[in-house]
Amino acid sequence: MKAAQVIAGADGGRLEVRDIPVPRPGANEVLVRVRASGLNYGEIKYMREHRSGNPMTAGVEFAGEVVRVGEQVSQWREGDRVMGHGRGCHAQYVVAAPLALMAVPDDVSWVDAAAFPNVFITAHDALVSNGELKAGESVFVNGASGGVGMAAIMIAATMRARPVIASSRSAAKLERLADFGVNVGVNASTDSQVDAIMSATDRRGVDIIIDTVGGTVFEDHVRSLAVKGRLVNLARLGGASTAQLDLNLLWQNRLKLIGATFRTRTEQERLDCIQACARDLLPFFRGGRLRLPIDKTFPMASIGEAYAYIASSQHMGKIVLTAD
């Protein structure tokens, strides 16, 4: 089969589409014929850091048909349309755990299905499981035009958060985000985040912040939180991994500072996140309310071009690979 693999190098990894054997599912695994797979910025970071070791097939989310099930699998059967979360899916076939899969409705395209798993699982874990979102609470999302940011906005709006506040450095992207549930847009290039959030929340601050920028905005985040506010950090795309913390604000406002990543989770914890997302969000996905816009699709043979495009930050929504 064809697979897009990351080849280790002294200066970082490189991508190459290779012919490799079709994987064989174990007794409690499922083999899926991949029809489409979503791209995520984290995969570019992983490629750049891959300086040693064996070639690794890229990709963490996919959609396709079940073609074989292990003898201990009862949840799925051949022919089922599924989408899932798991490594090595920028390929024509992928092996997955049964609990890493979710059903794809017949009227949903492979491309739309492939755009769902990673970003919505990540955003649900941040906003609902860690952020403990309740209806009527306020939410602020930075880096809001990326896949996880847009997913968090849509989940917040669907779960009746109010107001939903989002920031971006692009005025054009902020304008488009209003269609996905943003009540207040903050231009990160020109506006004061703290002032904008305080104005939007009648000076009380925001209940939950979903942060992908990191240290450069950390102090503003702490100053923007309401009493008992929760800050959930998912990434440090702003470049800074350190920041100063005013312990008086932490103490006086009883804040929660939470880090969330899949890198240090056990396999069971990862599967629990997938199942929690499926429980809460699949009804809205089936109903058409939780669908990310597809910015662009690429064939697997053009994955290098796709990686360059996502690294340029021109996109809004998801970039998806279609399998040959």
Image: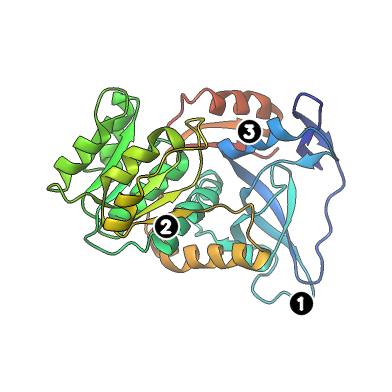
Mark 2 Cα shell of 10 Å, populated few (<14), some (14-19), many (≥20): some
The residue under the point 50% across, 56% down is 121
The residue under the point 75% across, 27% down is 12
| Residue 299 pos. (x, y %) | 65, 32
Q: Where is residue 188, by image quadrant?
A: top left
Query: Does residue 83 appear to the left or right of 210 in the view shown?
Result: right
Q: Nearer the viewer, residue 106 or 256?
A: 256
Tell me the SS state at disc 3. Answer: helix
| Residue 140 pos. (x, y %) | 31, 45
Q: Vertically, is 252 above or below 99? A: above
Query: Does residue 144 appear to the left or right of 265 in the view shown?
Result: left
The first of marks 3 and 1 along the sequence is 3
Q: Amino acid at mark 1?
A: Gln
Q: CA distance from mark 2 to mark 3?
A: 27 Å
Q: Which mark is residue 72?
A: 1
Q: Is residue 59 visible?
A: yes
List the residue tagged with mark 3.
44
The first of marks 1 and 2 along the sequence is 1
Q: Nearer the viewer, residue 304 or 128?
A: 128
The residue under the point 64% across, 68% down is 268
The first of marks 2 and 3 along the sequence is 3
List the residue tagged with mark 2.
285
Q: Nearer the viewer, residue 131 or 22?
A: 131
- Color theme of the render: rainbow
| Residue 237 pos. (x, y %) | 50, 33
Query: Does residue 261 appear to the left or right of 19 in the view shown?
Result: left
Tell me the SS state at disc 1. Answer: loop
The residue under the point 80% across, 62% down is 25
Q: CA distance from mark 1 to mark 2?
A: 29 Å
